Image: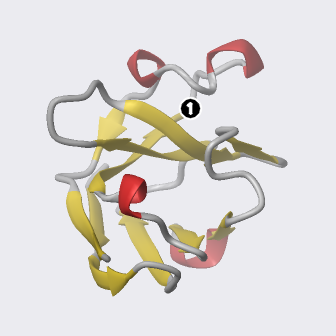
Amino acid sequence: VQLQASGGLVQTGGSLRLSCVASGRAITMGWFRQAPGKEREFVAAIRWTEYYADSVKGRFTISRDNAKNTVYLQMNSLKPEDMAVYYCASGNRLIQSTITQGTAYDYWGQGTLVTVSS
């Protein structure tokens, strides 16, 4: 499985949509991010339902197109603290209790930088 994602530059309060294409089917697809000097953190994931980190709930929306093996992350009301390298990930063996754990995912994209300017 290969994962490719696209990011970009946006102003504070703006919106950006990330997309990630998997070369194969995946039951669970998720997004993580890592800001400079910080640990990687869970952002959102989707199986037959969606999961969100508290820090993005209400601002970010994860969705998927199974026909295209693609997962999207719509990010609204972006803040400077959202600036990070965003990674998509996929896995087929996760259980609900491991959704937020990066180690539970099997495949990772190369990461894409999201820059939020003030």
Crowding near pointer 1: few (<14 within 10 Å), some, many (20+)?
some
Which residue is painted at 26% across and 65% down in the image?
4
In the rendered image, residue 12, in percent from the top left (x then y), is placed at 43, 78
Q: Nearer the viewer, residue 1 or 114?
A: 114
Furthest residue to the right? 49
Q: Which residue is mark 1?
A: 92
Q: Tell which of 32 and 118 is nearer to you.
A: 118
Total numbered labels placed on residues in the image = 1
Residue 54 image point, x, y percent: 70, 39
Quadrant of the rendered image containing residue 77: bottom right
Q: How is the image coloured?
A: secondary structure
Amino acid of disc 1:
Asn
Residue at the limit of the structure toward the front, as seen here: 118
Measured from the top left, where is residue 97 in percent x and y?
A: 72, 13
Q: Determine the secondary structure under disc 1.
A: loop
Which quadrant of the rendered structure holds the C terminus?
bottom left
Q: Residue at x 38, y 29 (%)?
A: 106
Please say if 82 is above or below 114. Answer: above
Quick check: 34 above or below 83?
above
Rendered residue at 46%/42% (across/down): 90
Q: Is residue 54 left or right of residue 35?
A: right
Height in image: 78 above or below 62?
below
Residue 41 shown left or right of residue 98 in the figure: left
Q: Is residue 65 left or right of residue 23?
A: right
Q: Nearer the viewer, residue 22 or 41?
A: 41
Residue for point 34% across, 84% down: 10
Identify which residue, 13 or 7, lies in the foreground: 13
Place of residue 73 in the rendered image (x, y in percent of width and height, measured from the top left) = 55, 68
85 relative position to 10: left or right? left
